[in-house]
Image (cartoon, grey):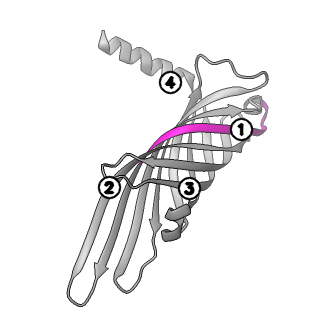
Amino acid sequence: MKKSLLALLLITTIAMGQGLRVFTGLSIPLGDFGDVYKSTMQYGGSYTMKMPGIEPPPGAELITEYLIGYAKYQGDTDSFITMREYTMIPLIANGILDMNPSAKDFGGLAPNLLLGIGYYLGTNSWTMESDYLALTYNDSEAYVGINIGGGADYYFNKHALLTATAKYHYMMSMSEYDTGSMSLFDIRLGAGFSF
């Protein structure tokens, strides 16, 4: 029975699927995080599918996006801290409002808005060196957060598209030793294949 339900879920997910996307872009740390770490390139991919059970506004379509990304931020150093890095892997589920779904059939521009929730895995690494010692520190932490933004997809035909997105992320710490909150702004460009 469990195998049958799993197979049904898999078939339904594939049937409702819309496409795969890959992206790269600039990730800009904000606030206290931005005071220490510099902007960096990010990379990732996502899977999109039609959102079930919710009626979209007339002339629009609702899409669910499951996204994974990767970014490594370089931090400020000095005579004692000779290396400072922060690695982040976001796992995000977005709801996307596609305001021109007919672009998939006829080609053209499809603007969109998005809102999502995410689980962000971070690793803080730094090395401190002096004449007498060298110490390397690594600490992993987890955040939950939201992201909001918008962008546009340009469809060349039913299957090939380019995508551009700008998003703001706000994250709250889940770590035992509360490290507060952090925020980012992303600008992403990508390409995709639509089923």
How busy is the neighbourhood of tag 3: few (under 14 within 10 Å), some, or many (20 plus)?
Answer: some
Residue bearing the label numbered 4:
14
Residue bearing the label numbered 3:
184
Amino acid type at mark 3: Leu
Whether residue 188 is visible: yes
Magenta segment: does it hold 77?
Answer: no
Q: Residue 51: horizontal and vertical position, in percent?
A: 59, 24
How busy is the neighbourhood of tag 1: few (under 14 within 10 Å), some, or many (20 plus)?
Answer: many
Q: Quadrant of residue 64?
A: top right
Of the numbered discs 3 and 1, the one sitting upstream in the chain is: 1
Amino acid type at mark 2: Ser
Q: What span is colored magenta in the figure?
A: 106-120
| Secondary element at image label 2 | strand
Q: Nearer the viewer, mark 4 or mark 1?
A: 1
Q: Is residue 159 left or right of residue 75?
A: right
Q: Residue at x 56, y 22 (%)?
A: 16
Question: How far apart are the alpha carbons under marks 4 and 1?
Answer: 23 Å
How busy is the neighbourhood of tag 2: few (under 14 within 10 Å), some, or many (20 plus)?
Answer: few
Q: 144 above or below 48?
A: below
Amino acid type at mark 1: Asn
Of the numbered discs 2 and 4, the one sitting upstream in the chain is: 4
Q: Residue at x 30, y 13 (%)?
A: 2
Going by the picture, which residue comes out furthest to the top?
1
